[in-house]
Image (tube, coloured by chain):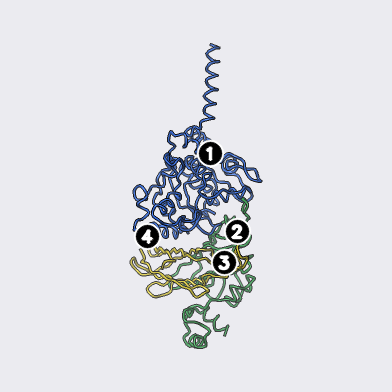
């Protein structure tokens, strides 16, 4: 009996070790969801897509007032126009995407096993431009955000479905993203998780920290602070700066991988972009 | 000349003769004929002087027939949703002032034919302050106020 | 027309109008980060809404109205299908207008 237990214990240790070396996304996801369910027992799973407004009533009311006629509607209109305008060669964005680019945001980001990298929606938009002889758009705001907003809008209600194929490169990218999320950085020596997981719902001065579960569903986002629309990488850069860390470039591998992990953690939640936030 | 502008605004009607004279004198360009923009009111640095410039007086009567819907703590001082509802009969205008703003008068809504006592907009507030709603009706001005806290954010600004 | 989004919904005998206008609403106090110079004031001063040619609402605004301003008000006396016109003028003399039907 003792021998059996010892062997079982050893096996247990070994499999734990192999799990640490090889990221287990599904297990991570289960633990992530369990953590937030435990932290906010009264918040229904589907409400996490509303970020801080799912956990704070006072700011929720202000957000609902903004949602009566949200400023991002202007961006959706602009994005639709840009999306439908042909390139110089006569083709449109629709030619680069599944289903003509309509209602497909839940697929992003995805891991391109051939190219060996994570592809984000904005990355795909600019890749489409390059393919059709057009100059790339700037990454953080402006036209790319408008187009992304339109595509996000057509995908509202679709459940986030980021796939991690059984591919070494994909798992590595996922792992790098996960490491970024949990690594301390900057002069303030804080990680994404410090604010958005361990302290979700708590205040940092006058701000309430949003839970990381459901974080990515509402991008691109119209932030009152920006007075305009911005992409998720724009926000990543801002967040890095806010802990006084040097930000990475938008659409760098670092942020692509982070977005990959970050979005996977919101799988199953319904897309609700573009969104309005403070 | 300034008097003429103010009175035209207050009456809310096109006093053809006076306005016509003002237009030909180059004081009012045609597109602003209906309601000249009250510069002095919008540039006034206090609630009292803004109301003096806007309506000729700053005498306010507190009223419980005006309600202000605004957050207790603004999420972002640049975009504070404010809604004013009033049941005061024959309300002619609803004005919104942010007491501690450099220039308190933020907006004034002239209610036209059939308009209900309700307006909603989003305003900028520089700091924690009372938001004051002033309803003009029957030659008097009624008001109520609500404090809205404006804080500096936490995520480094 | 391109800068204004408007919705006019009739419920009973009250029409609720909601409008969102694309406009920077610059106060004139903000500094350009690159040049350090103040960005000149540029804000809507007047918004007018007309129903069948009669003004139902005239809004006089200062620069303290938020960027991409929102406006909502209610009025009686309209029927479904009636025409509503919303127009604005800013301090630089720029303007825009749009028409919509009460639904």
Same chain for marks 1 and 2?
no
Look at the numbered disc 2 and give the secondary structure of its residue.
strand
The residue labelled by disc 2 is B148
The residue labelled by disc 3 is C64
Q: Is residue A178 visible?
A: yes
Q: CA distance from mark 3 to mark 1?
A: 45 Å
Q: Is residue C77 visible?
A: no
Same chain for marks 2 and 3?
no
Look at the numbered disc 1 and give the secondary structure of its residue.
helix
Mark 4 surroundings within 10 Å by alpha-carbon count, few (fewer than 14), some (14 through 19), many (20 or more): few
| Chain hosting mark 3 | C
Q: CA distance from mark 1 to mark 2?
A: 44 Å
Q: Mark 4–mark 2 contact, CB under 8 Å? A: no
Which chain identifier belongs to the blue chain? A
Which chain identifier belongs to the yellow chain? C
Q: Mark 3–mark 4 contact, CB under 8 Å? A: no
Badge nearest the viewer, 3 or 4: 4
Look at the numbered disc 3 and give the secondary structure of its residue.
loop
Which numbered circle lies on residue A88?
4
Residue A112: image x %, image y %? 43, 41
Same chain for marks 3 and 4?
no
Same chain for marks 1 and 4?
yes
Q: Which quarter of the image is occupied by the C terminus of chain A?
A: bottom right
Mark 3 surroundings within 10 Å by alpha-carbon count, few (fewer than 14), some (14 through 19), many (20 or more): many
For marks 1 and 4 on the same chain, the one whose residue lies earlier in the sequence: 4
Q: Using residue B148 as the reference point, say whether residue C13 is left or right of it.
A: left
Same chain for marks 4 and 2?
no
The residue labelled by disc 1 is A176
């Amino acid at each position: 009996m003792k021998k059996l237990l010892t062997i079982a214990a050893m096996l247990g240790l070994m499999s734990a070790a192999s799990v640490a070396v090889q990221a287990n996304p599904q297990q991570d996801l289960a633990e992530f969801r369990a953590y937030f369910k435990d932290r906010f027992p009264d918040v229904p799973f589907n409400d996490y897509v509303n970020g801080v407004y799912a956990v704070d009533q006072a700011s929720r009311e202000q957000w609902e007032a903004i949602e009566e006629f949200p400023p991002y509607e202007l961006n959706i209109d602009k994005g639709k126009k840009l999306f439908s305008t042909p390139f110089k060669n006569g083709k449109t964005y629709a030619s680069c995407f599944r289903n003509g680019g309509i209602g497909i945001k839940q697929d992003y980001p995805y891991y391109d096993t051939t190219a060996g990298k994570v592809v984000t929606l904005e990355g795909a938009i600019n890749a489409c431009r390059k393919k059709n002889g057009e100059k790339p758009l700037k990454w953080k705001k402006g036209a790319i955000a408008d187009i992304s907003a339109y595509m996000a809008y057509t995908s509202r209600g679709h459940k986030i479905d980021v796939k991690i194929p059984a591919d070494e490169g994909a798992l590595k990218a996922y792992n790098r993203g996960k490491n970024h999320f949990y690594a301390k950085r900057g002069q303030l020596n804080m990680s994404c998780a410090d604010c958005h997981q361990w302290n979700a719902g708590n205040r940092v001065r006058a701000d309430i920290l949003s839970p990381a579960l459901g974080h990515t569903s509402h991008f691109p986002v119209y932030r009152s602070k920006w007075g305009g629309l911005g992409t998720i990488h724009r926000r990543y850069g801002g967040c890095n700066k806010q802990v006084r860390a040097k930000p990475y470039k938008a659409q760098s591998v670092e942020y692509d991988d982070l977005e990959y992990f970050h979005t996977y953690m919101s799988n199953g939640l319904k897309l609700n972009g573009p969104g309005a936030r403070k | 000349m300034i008097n003429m502008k103010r009175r035209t605004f207050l009456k809310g009607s096109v006093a053809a003769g006076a306005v016509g004279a003002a237009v030909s004198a180059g004081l009012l360009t045609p597109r602003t004929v209906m309601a000249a923009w009250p510069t002095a009111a919008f540039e006034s640095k206090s609630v009292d002087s803004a109301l003096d410039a806007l309506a000729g007086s700053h005498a306010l009567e507190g009223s419980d027939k005006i309600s202000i819907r605004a957050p207790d703590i603004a999420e972002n001082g640049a975009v504070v949703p404010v809604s004013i509802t009033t049941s005061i009969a024959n309300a002619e205008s609803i004005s919104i002032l942010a007491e501690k703003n450099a220039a308190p008068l933020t907006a004034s809504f002239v209610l036209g034919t059939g308009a209900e006592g309700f307006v909603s907009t989003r305003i900028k507030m520089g700091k924690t302050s009372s938001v004051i709603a002033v309803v003009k009706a029957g030659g008097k001005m009624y008001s109520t106020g609500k404090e809205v806290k404006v804080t500096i954010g936490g995520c480094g600004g | 027309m391109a800068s204004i989004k408007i919705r006019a919904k009739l419920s009973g005998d009250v029409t609720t109008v909601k409008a969102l206008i694309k406009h920077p609403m610059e106060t004139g106090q903000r500094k350009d980060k690159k040049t350090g110079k103040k960005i000149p004031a540029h804000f809507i001063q007047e918004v007018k809404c007309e129903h069948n040619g009669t003004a139902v609402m005239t809004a006089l605004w200062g620069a303290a109205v938020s960027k991409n301003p929102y406006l909502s008000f209610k009025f009686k006396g309209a029927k479904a299908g009636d025409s509503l016109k919303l127009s604005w003028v800013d301090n630089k003399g720029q303007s825009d207008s749009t028409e919509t039907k009460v639904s």
